[in-house]
Image (cartoon, rainbow, N blue to C red):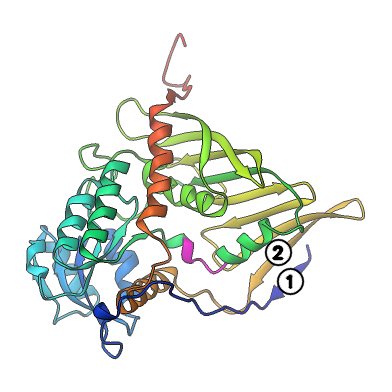
Amino acid sequence: MPYFTLRFQRGEQSNSRSDSRNVSNPTKPVRLGIVGCGAVTREMHLPAFIQSPNVEVTYLCDRITKNTQLAKQEYGLPDARVTAEVKDFAGQVDAALVAVPPKFHAPVTCELLGMGIDVLCEKPIALSTAEARQMSDAAKKHGRILSVGFVTRFNRNAEVFRRIVNDPLIGEVQEVIAEAGSVMGWVMTSDAYFNKKLTLGGAFFDSGVHLIDRVVDLFGDVSDIAYEDDSFGGVECNANLTGKLTIAGRAVPCRMSFSWTHGLLNGVKVIGTHGTAEVKYLDPDALIVTRTVGGEPMELAVRYQGSAPNPYLLQIEDFARAVRTRGTPKVTAESATMSLAIIERAYAARTPMKQPWVEVNR
């Protein structure tokens, strides 16, 4: 298999919107409060935050005291203040990460926005598009920044992949395949992944939303949705979705699969008339292109030189830039709501997945 190492130059981002009345002091880090200090915060966000010179974690909020204590101890934050109430952030922080169970995304975010605090909210943005619109409206009403934590948008291969799937290299797009699946074994500090009182769903809603966001960001909305999952009333562990994308004015089939019980592609594969392009979001440095050359299928692995930057670090740097300049973050609430709308339509069209190993007479 031929192996190519390519260099890519990054253009500097421009900010189309700014408000000079609200520009933070560019010489000081953004004072950041964190709401929710569970596993996601401690395993993913805090390792990036402490690397950034542009944010300073000054407040930790969690109603479970052990979580805030662990965050302070594990990441050397002796000066960070601790509280169980979001209201204590008033006048003490410039911005906040909201990393609580999805049920609380909307009320916590709206409270913070109303206090004049910019917000980076973990995905999914909310439990419903109605809640997501309330959050967007609150941000606009109070003149605040609201971004959503779709961290795979910050993978280094994301923009290169966008250029390739829109390039004649693979030809006219014929099908898009997206899969997210692995045996569920990551760190948890509560039952929030499984508790329908705290979340809307499982593999499709919680993990799969990353993949849906990638497809929507590349190609736009999904129509003609058919959806099945294995839920018996709890959260789904396996799900399949089929639909249509509109690409260059044509209806293109799209199929997606999601699992918490077995491994899948964990990425997006675009099939064209001349070849395919594939990206895996767990390997943010690489992408794979296949072409038929001289009648023989060839696979080209394209990889950046050097190690990939931490996408969580890129995400918080992007958010800090938006806070300081009053610019637009890479992931807006409006774009995050598009992914949630697809999930809503899928759940509304749900059919039960066939499971002959647990059912009889079907």
**Where residue 186 sits: x, y (%)?**
36, 54
Q: Residue furthest top?
A: 361
Q: Residue at x 26, y 82 (%)?
A: 24
Q: Quadrant for residue 68, please give it.
A: bottom left
Q: Residue furthest bottom?
A: 27
List the residue tagged with mark 1.
4
Q: Nearer the viewer, residue 355 or 6?
A: 6
The residue type indicated by label 2 comes to: Ala
Q: Earlier in the sequence, mark 2 or mark 1?
A: 1
User: Which quarter of the picture shows residue 52?
Assistant: bottom left
| Residue found at the very far right of the displayed protein | 294
Asked if residue 83 is positioned above or below residue 128 in the image, the reply reads below
275 with respect to 158 (left or right): right
Front residue of this view, candidates 130 and 200: 130
What x and y, as percent, mark residue 119?
A: 26, 64
Distance in Å between CA atoms under marks 2 and 1? 6 Å
Residue with the mark numbered 2: 301
Point 54% across, 69% down: residue = 156
Q: Main secondary structure of the magenta part?
A: loop
Q: Quadrant of the N terminus?
A: bottom right
Circle 1 — which element?
Answer: strand
Q: Is residue 156 located in the magenta-colored stretch of the structure? A: yes
| Residue 130 against residue 13 in the figure, above or below | above
Give the structural element (helix, strand or loop) at label 2: strand
Callout 2–callout 1 Cβ contact below 8 Å: yes
Q: Which mark is residue 311?
A: none
Write the start and end of the magenta stretch as one range: 153-157
